[in-house]
Amino acid sequence: MGFAFSDYSDVVMPGRCDVLLTNATVLTMDEQWTIHRNSGVAIRGDAIEAVGPPALTLEAAESIDCGGRVIMPGLVNAHTHAAMTLLRGLADDLRLDVWLMGYMMPVEREFVSADFVRLGTSLACAEMIRSGVTCFADMYYFEEAVAQATADAGMRALCGQTVLRFPAPDAASYEDALARTRDFVSRWRSHPLIVPSPAPHAPYTCTPEILRACAELAAEFDVPLHTHLSETLLEVEQSRRLNGMPVIPWAKKQGLFGAKVLAAHCVHVDEGEIRALKNAGAGIAHNPTSNLKLAAGVAPVAKMLELGVNVGIGTDGAASNNDLDMFEETRLAALLAKGTSGDPTTLPARQALTMATRLGAAALHIDRLTGSLQPGKRADLIVVDVSALHNVPSFHRDPNSVYAHIVYAAKSTDVSDVMCNGRWLMRDRRLLTLNEAELRREAQECARRIDAFLGSREVSVLQKLVAVGGAIEQESFEVQVKARIPSAEQVQRVIDSDELTVIRSSRYRQHDTYWSFDDLEQGRLRYRQDEFLDRSGQVTGERSRLTLTGRTREEDRFGSVLLSRSRYLAPAAHSQRFYREYFRPAGERVVEKERLRWLVAYRGVEFYVHLDRLVSPPTPGYFVEVKSRTWSRRDARDKAAVISELLALFGAKPDDTISDGYVELTAKSQ
Ligand SMILES: [Zn+2]
C-alpha cells in the first residue's frame, strides 16, 4: 500500500508544497527543542516538507495564516483501550479486581463485538482528535475493527490485538487469539496509518507460551508488542510467590523482550528492572490518572527518564480515567512527579510535553514517523489557540515559558486544528472525518442496553454469581442434621467400631463467612476456606469455595432431618474481599471451626459425618453433623430415618437446639 501522496510526488516541483502554515509559534519538539517564532510549517503530501524559515521560502498551493497560534506535533496517547469509551462511567470507585472481573469483563463478554468496537473506537477518535491527539497505542479485542475505524477517522495508531489465556469476546481460546493476531498483523503491517501488534494482555493473564509466541510473532513481522507490566503491587507479589521473581525479570525470562515492547504502567519496578527495560529497548506508557483512580500507585517516572527510557503518557481506557484528554494527563504527569518527589524541579513542562509527543512516539517504536515536527516525518500536527483568557498573558524572557503555558494553562479545548498524515481531521474545531451527533446517539443506545443487562443481573445473587464465572453445578439436595453433643468420645467410639465402615477421613480447620441479603429469597452465600491439617495439626494445604444456599422451607423437614438446597457451588476464583465488595451483603457472620470428617457406609448408605469444635465464636462442647446427598423426596425420607438412628448412636440429645452462629436450625425429634 503506497502513501496517499506518492502518486503526485513526481509532478510536484522542488520548492513547492501543498499546505503552508504561517504566522505561528512552531514547537518542533525535536532533540534540540527548537522553537520558531513568527514562522511556519510546510506540508507536502503526507509529510512535513520544511519547518521554520525554510518553509516560508516555499511556494504553496494553499497558505494558511495561523494568527499567532502555536503549531506543535500531534499528541501521542501511549496507552488506551479506545473502544472502552462505551463503558465510560459504567462502574467507578471500585477496587481493580471488582471493577475488572465484576463489571468490565462480564459486560465485555456479553457486548463486545466487531460493531461495538467500531463504534467505541470512532467515539474515542472523535474525542482524541478534539483534544489534539493524532496517534495512540490501543489494545483491545476485534482489533481489526479498531484499525479500520481509526484509519477511517484518519488517525495513526499502534493497534494491539489482545491475547489472553482465557476465552475472550473474539477468541474461544488462546490458540484462536494467536491465530487472529497473526492474521491481523500480516494483513495490516504495511498500512500508512496503522501499525499492528500482538498484545499479550499481561503476564498474570497469559502463560509463558503465550508471551513467547507473541514475542516471536512480533519479531517475525518486525512490529512492536504491547502489554501491561507491573501495574499493581498485588501483581508483583503474586509473581514473586509463583515465579520466585518480580514481573519484569520473569517476563524477560519468557523471552518477551525479544520483541520491541511497549509496556503500560510499570508502577512497581525497582531501578534494576528499569535498567532491564532500558537495555531491552522497551518503551513505557505512564498512565497517571488510571493509576491514581484505581489506586495502583505512582510509577517512578523521573527515574525512568533519568536512566534514558522512552516514557510516553497514556490515558488508559475511558472506563478507568474517565476521559481521553492528553492535556490533562500531561499536566497530571508533571504535577504528580513533583508531588511524590518533593522536588518542584522534577519533570519540568518541556520534558512532560516531550513525553506526550516525541518520547511517546519512541515508546511506541514509531518515532521515525511521528512525534516531532521535522522534515521527512509524517505531517501529524495540531494548532493550539493560546488567546483564551486562561492562557493570557505570555512572556518571552524565558523560552521555556511556552511549554509551561501548554502544560499548565492550556486546555484540550484550545486545540483548533488537527492534521494527521497530511490530512485535516479538524478545522476551526469542526470534525471533518466523524459525525458527532450520530456517535452520541449510537453510544447512548449502547449504554441503554448495558444498563438493562446489569439491571437484570443485579436482581439476583445467583445471576451476579454466574456473571463472575466459575463452574455452575446443578441444583443439588442433601439431607442433613446437626446436633450438639457434650463430648467427642462417643462419636469416636462409634467410628472406630464395626457398626459402620470408614471409607476415608480428613481433618481441617474451616473458616466460613456467611453473607445474608435484605431479600431473604436470595438465600445465603457462604465463602468457605479449608485448611487441611495433618495429625500434628500442621497445615498441609487449602482450598476456597463459594456456596449459595437457598432458603429452607418448613415442609423440607423429615423429623429432625433437614432437606437443604444448594443452588450453586463453585471454587472461589476470587478473594473473600472481592466477593464482599462485589455482592455488598446486608449482613456478615464469621464462623471458624476444627472439623474431623469421615465418609462412612452405614446400612448400605454413604454418609458424611462431621465432628466439629467451634473456635469462633468460642463455644463449649462439640457438634456432630451427618449428611448425605439425595435425589428424590422418597430417598430423602429413607435416608432421614437412617440419619436419626446414627445420631442416636452418637449420643446426640434429640431436643438440643443448635444456634451456634452458623446454622439457624433447630434439630428436634418428632
Ligand atoms: Zn490498559
Image (tube, grey):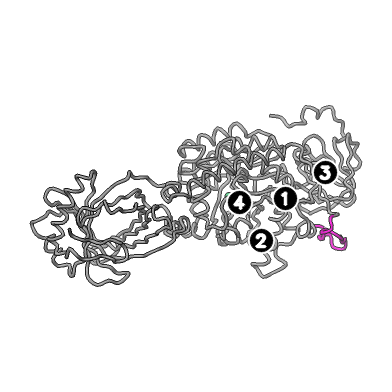
- Is 630 on the left-hand or right-hand side of 159? left
In reply to whether residue 397 is colored magenta, the answer given is yes
Callout 3 secondary element: loop
Q: Nearer the viewer, residue 519 or 646?
A: 519
Quarter that holds the N terminus? top right
Residue 357: which numbered mark, if any? 1
Quarter that holds the C terminus? bottom left
Q: Which residues are magenta?
A: 388-402
Mark closest to the chain's N terminus, 1 or 3:
1
Mark closest to the chain's N terminus, 2 or 3:
2
Mark closest to the chain's N terminus, 2 or 1:
2
Q: Which residue is mark 2?
A: 306
Contact check, label 1 and label 3, Cβ < 8 Å: no
Up the image or down, 261 lies above or below 540; here it is above
Up the image or down, 597 lies above or below 118; here it is below
Callout 2 secondary element: helix
Q: What amino acid is labelled 2 in the image?
A: Glu
Q: Which residue is mark 4?
A: 89
Mark closest to the chain's N terminus, 4 or 3:
4
Q: What amino acid is labelled 3 in the image?
A: Asp
Q: Residue at x 70, y 54 (%)?
A: 355
